[in-house]
Image (cartoon, rainbow, N blue to C red):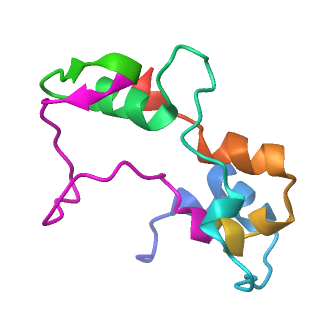
Amino acid sequence: MRRGVRSSWAASPLRDAVEALPAAEEVRARYTRTAFKHWTDTDRDGCNTGKEVLLAEAFTTPEQGARCAVEGGLWYSPVDAAGGLDVDHRVPLTEAWNSGAGQWPARELEAYASDRPTSCG
């Protein structure tokens, strides 16, 4: 910080909130992706969460076939990877596990893994 310039970060509600977060060692033992039942059809419309994200995030709308099969379409990713498209979680499941999700009950793991990002409507 430059002398004579007060940082808005120094006394902000965000800083207070960050400082109030508990700090703990991550637990990296016994992670298994299958503990998270994911890509479920939480709204029971016939499309699982992964397909709903694909449909909602497409720049060119794909064809929706039987059992919500998605064909065609065009997507843009700011993290452009060589290879195929993989719809994944904003916070990887392994990171959630390491940060305490390993202590959650099965229904909470499923709810976390099948949560749609707010940008999907």
Where, by quadrant of the figure, is residue 61 drawn? top left
Total numbered labels: 0
- Residue range highlighted in magenta: 68-95
Residue at the (40%, 22%) spot, across then down: 67
On the rendered structure, is 76 left or right of 66?
left
Where, by quadrant of the figure, is residue 65 drawn? top left
Residue at the (50%, 33%) spot, across then down: 49
Quadrant of the image containing the N terminus: bottom left
> In the displayed structure, would residue 30 be above or below residue 5?
below
Which percent across, then down, holds residue 87?
36, 48
Q: Main secondary structure of the magenta part?
A: loop
On the rendered structure, is 18 left or right of 95?
right
Residue at the (61%, 17%) spot, across then down: 44
69 or 109, which lies in front?
Answer: 69
Residue at the (76%, 82%) spot, across then down: 27
On the rendered structure, is 96 left or right of 89?
right
Which percent across, then down, holds residue 114?
59, 40
30 or 93, which lies in front?
Answer: 30
Where, by quadrant of the figure, is residue 21 drawn? bottom right
Instruction: Please say whether residue 80 is one of the residues in the magenta stretch.
Output: yes
> In the displayed structure, would residue 66 be above or below residue 30?
above
Extreme residue toward the front, this view: 66
Which percent across, then down, holds residue 55?
31, 25
Q: Can residue 65 be seen at all in this image of the molecule? A: yes
> In the displayed structure, would residue 3 be above or below residue 11?
below
Which percent across, then down, holds residue 98?
69, 75
Q: Can residue 12 be seen at all in this image of the molecule? A: no
Extreme residue toward the top, this view: 45
Quadrant of the image containing the C terminus: top left
Instruction: Please say whether residue 105 is one of the residues in the magenta stretch.
Output: no
